[in-house]
Image: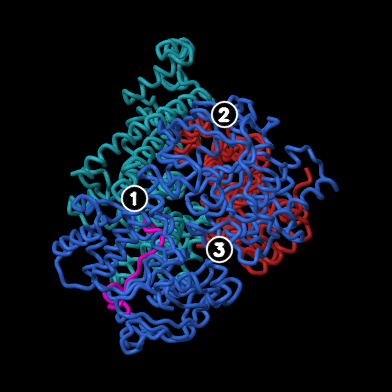
Chain colours: A cyan, B red, C blue
Amino acid sequence: MNTIGATLLRAGRRFVSSLPALFGVLVFTFLLMRVLPGDPAVFFASGPNAGKEEIEVIRRQLGLDKPLPNQLVIYLADVGRGNLGRSMMTGQAVAKDLRERLPASLELTLTALLIALVSAVPLGVIAALRPGSLVDHGVRLFCSLGVCVPTFVSGLLLIYVFYYLLGFAPDPTGRIDIFTTMPPQRTSFLIIDFLLAGDFEGWSAAARQLMLPAFTMALFVIAPLARITRASMLVSLGSDFVRTARSVGLSWWRIVVTYALRNAILPVITIAGIVFSTMLGANVLVEKVFSWPGVASYALDALLVSDYAPVQGFVLLMATIFVIVNLLVDLLYGIADPRATVA
Amino acid sequence: MSMTTIETSSTLRHTAFVLRGNPVTAIAAGGAVLLALMAILAPWLAPYDPIASDVPAALQPPSAAHWFGTDQLGRDVLSRLVVASRLDLTIAVTAVAVSFAIGSVIGALCGYAGGRLDKAVGRFVDVLMAFPLFVLAMAMVAALGNRVENIVIATAIINLPFYIRFARAEVNIRRNLGWVEAARACGESHVAVVLRFLLPNVLPAMAVQMSLNLGWAILNAAGLSFIGLGVKPPTPEWGIMVAEGARFISTGRWWLVAFPGLALMSAVLCFNLLGDGLRDILDPRMRT
Amino acid sequence: MTGSDSTKALLEVENLKVTFSTRRGLVEAVRGVSLSLAPGEMLGLVGESGSGKSVTGFAVTHLLDKAGRITDGRIRFKGQDITRAGGADLRSLHGAAMSMIFQNPRAALNPIRTVGQQIADAILAHRRLSRQEALAEALQLLKAVQIRDPERRMSAYPHELSGGMCQRVMIAIAISCSPQLLIADEPTTGLDVTTQKVVMDLLAHIAAERGMATILITHDLGLAARYCARVVVMEQGRLVEEAAPLTLFHRPQHPYTKRLVAASPTATSRIEDLVPDGDGIPLVEVTELPPPPHGTPLLLDVKNIVKRFDDGTIGVADFSMTMRGGESVGLVGESGSGKSTTSRMICRLIDASEGEILFDGQAIGQIPARDFHRSELRKDIQIVFQDPNDSLNPRYTAFDCIAHPLFRLMNMRSGDKMRRRVEECAERVGLPRELLSRFPHQLSGGQKARVGIARAIACKPRLLVLDEPTAALDVSVQAVVLQLLNKLRREDNLAFLFVSHDLNVVRMMCDRTIVLRTGAIVEQGESRALFANPQTDYTRELVDAVPHIAPPVALQACPV
């Protein structure tokens, strides 16, 4: 009971304390809009060919002739109403475009995160249990190399090996073959929707399509995760309380898992936020390499044709997701570490 | 003030001694020096003109004439790669140097003084860190204009939070140490304590951070140009070379991606290993 | 070994050698130690840092870290050779037959597991019980270690408990499976003196009640003497002497033991007795300083200073004191009593929230601490810091450290004059001239302490604030440093504000003593009178808690 109350209290407090950052994010994207070499009025006009008068009218309608602070208020009100402007490229509202593409990006990022965690934590633990062994050296080498290969290079090389040379992977463009019948939309995550629809052929097609980009992204973050797991596991194993556990004769399993690992996982949770940030960044590159129809490639396409409203919407979306992720990470930490609830 | 009595020769001897015990670090340091030399001597090292196209010789695999093959315009990949090192290293080094200079001083002042300044800077850092940093850099380059200088500025800004936080934390744990209070009892002002006593003591740790950050900055800059920001073709740059080669990977032209990728990787690896090595040398407890 | 019958001995250690592999090659930490322990006996294992006492304890329990290895010798437990025990043998031994209590109890407990669970874990390691039964038993153990409110503590985490309570929990864990041997490694170091007494009393009580043999590893001769029937002294990995405590204190045989006994401050020792032959520094003639005549202007007059921190907590509440030139005043208190904060306010390193500080009649409290470095009086008030390891700038040589105040406060530019002055200071604190070019990490703890003192006296201050100047030093080094400070004080007619938690040291060093508790003055007065006849309960408690060695009278009753 008590812990749940404390966690909720902490959640509330953390949310309130992340509000200034969120406000800062809004102001920043607003300023971005002012600095960007485009005229917001043009976005809301019928198109690039709109007449001068029409643009002037829209300018007044949007309040772009008013002083900056007023405009900020208008902008905030717009964002509050979910109005992120209109994309010239698609002719749709940016908010709608983003909503349609977000599941693809999330599916990719979350799968990659899952792959990374499932492989990095055991690797780090094994390396820490046998420091100086062959496994340890292997893990360290892998970690050193892993952080050095840019995602866009490893992605392309994986395509070369698994698509061109071995032919294991399907054509590395997009989320699913266009000829596949799409499952009924429930979660918008293809691999889940296919499962729910009981279409295993479709599921395996979607999963095969997802594997290369997800692994590319995972590869980049396995290294830092495994590295921090190994380091904190070493600290844990050498700590006084593990010595205490040994001194009273606890079993190996209890010492390693209940005492060492549970403590060692705390720093891993702490950096999970940073890792997720890296992944959201890497997402941009991976989506470009694999022509993945997510929010990042949408923003990139828009950027290249100087369509700025989608870019702003994308930046705002990424920052919001990141703030939420940090909040979740923080709550998780609060549950995992009783010391955090007091502070 | 003639207080420092470190002799240069003994420092050098010490460094040499330490490097003998850390062969990996020595190799990394050697690699970093080689990279720098390559960047400086690029125009004389490159066997071909990195920009002149030679369409009949397009898309050739590696051969004796073109060690790393040729690209879709028949340009020599090796020459482009060597010349590109100039731009990539310059961007990374400039960005890291700028954010180090600004970030360490601000961070040190915040860590020592605390209070309102610390809170205000903390808020600013929080806002920066609320963005996925690569996305932030992307947005800034888009906003400021698609130019190389703006890549440097954007990279410097996204590095800033790390230096501020790092310097802040390092100074904060030292501010109440005996020797810091002793310096004040010896008649030093707060500002002098921060700049002349705390910062120099924090510098070695910052050097580690800088080395690690250099690799990260290179990756960021290359990533930005890969997605078409900052550097414009035909300028040779590693990221853009990979982007151009990406179109040909599905048809098996691996060398267009592999060699610039390898260049990126070895540069980053050098700086990362150097940073790790420096950290081990400075603080054996951090050995991981 | 002394008369212990080997057939009855619980533990026998024969010619034990332990080697550590370090970066600088192999280091032999224990070089042939033999001892034996009868069931139910309490043995004191005493030595200074680096003596190998803790390593011996860890070797016996097989808890050496990976770098350490038993290279020679034999360990027998209940007649069974356990020198090379491993795996399952070791696990059945640990906790069930022998267990350990560690220094720094908070770190020794798992920070993210409740206290009750941790005790239950220890119980379940050796007994077939359900977790419910184990938890019920854990509660009984918490009651046995006399923790207040044991039911609630069961679900507490270590960070929610005080250091003393953590050590009680540690004791509960250690005795959970009724081992016959308990090794306590510096169990009360880092705890306040009153807590130390309570914890040690509890430990002795439990050991006696359960008939547990105990090895008490400590650096504190007094502590060992108070609780152990037999004391073993170690130096540099070797066992140098073994005797009953009174014999050891009054007829030490080995030269090292002689020095150690002399250096350990007792309720009656005088500064000049601490170092037997006055080795190190020439002793000055000891005469009682006459009290400053009436009418001497006050050197320091502190009126009602208060320190409130930013978070609203009060560090010091309404502190007042006066000092005359050449006087030595002790400031005593446990952790959190505000003694360090007070000393820093007087030293003008931090600002007081309220109150006045007059130095030599001038209101220095008015000058903000941030500007005090420009004051003429900066050089008159200097400070010596607690931990010599972090009181010297790692980037300065010893010479630079001592020259720093000369440069800043006396405006001495480098040159012969400065060099002469630095060398003179080094000589006065007994620091060999050739050490002046060394960096702090190349100096020993005692040498660093000397540099810190030389730096403080370089500008010939009139008031020296000493913040626990010897707390981090071994007792034999402490003895020399205390003598040195006393000598300097007499030579320069320095006033000392001596901050310490060690009552014996303060009694020796100070004319007057002020006792602080939670930021307020509890009692003050002439040192000897105050300690001989405390007026308040708190001071009495403090004085009683100091482990004393019995006076020589008791020796006559004790057959040697």
3 or 2: tag closer to the N-terminus: 3
Q: Which mark is residue A5?
A: none
Which quadrant, please, contains the N terminus of chain C?
bottom left
Looking at the picture, do discs 3 and 2 lie on one chain? yes
Q: Kindly identify the amino acid type of the residue bearing the numbered disc 3.
A: Ala
Frontmost residue, C400 versus A342: C400
What label does residue C357 carry, if any?
A: 2
Which chain's residue wears label 3? C
Q: Position of residue A256 (x, y in %)?
A: 33, 66
- The residue identified by callout 1 is C162
Q: Which residues are magenta?
A: C90-107
- On the image, the x and y values in percent for residue C22 come to 56, 72
Chain letter for mark 1: C
Q: Horizontal and vertical percent for residue C517? A: 41, 41
* Above-or-below relation of C530 to B66: above
What residue appears at the point 33 percent right and 52 percent down from the top-left corner? A111
Q: Mark 2 is on which residue type?
A: Ile
Pick out the residue farthest to the right: C416
Q: State the CA–CA distance, disc 1 to disc 2.
A: 35 Å
Tag on residue C263?
3
Q: CA distance from mark 3 to mark 2?
A: 37 Å
Q: Nearer the viewer, residue A269 or C74?
A: C74
Identified by mark 1, the residue type is: Ser
Residue C172 position within the rendered picture, expressed as x and y whole percent measured from the top left: 26, 63
Tell me if B194 is positioned left or right of C153 in this view.
right
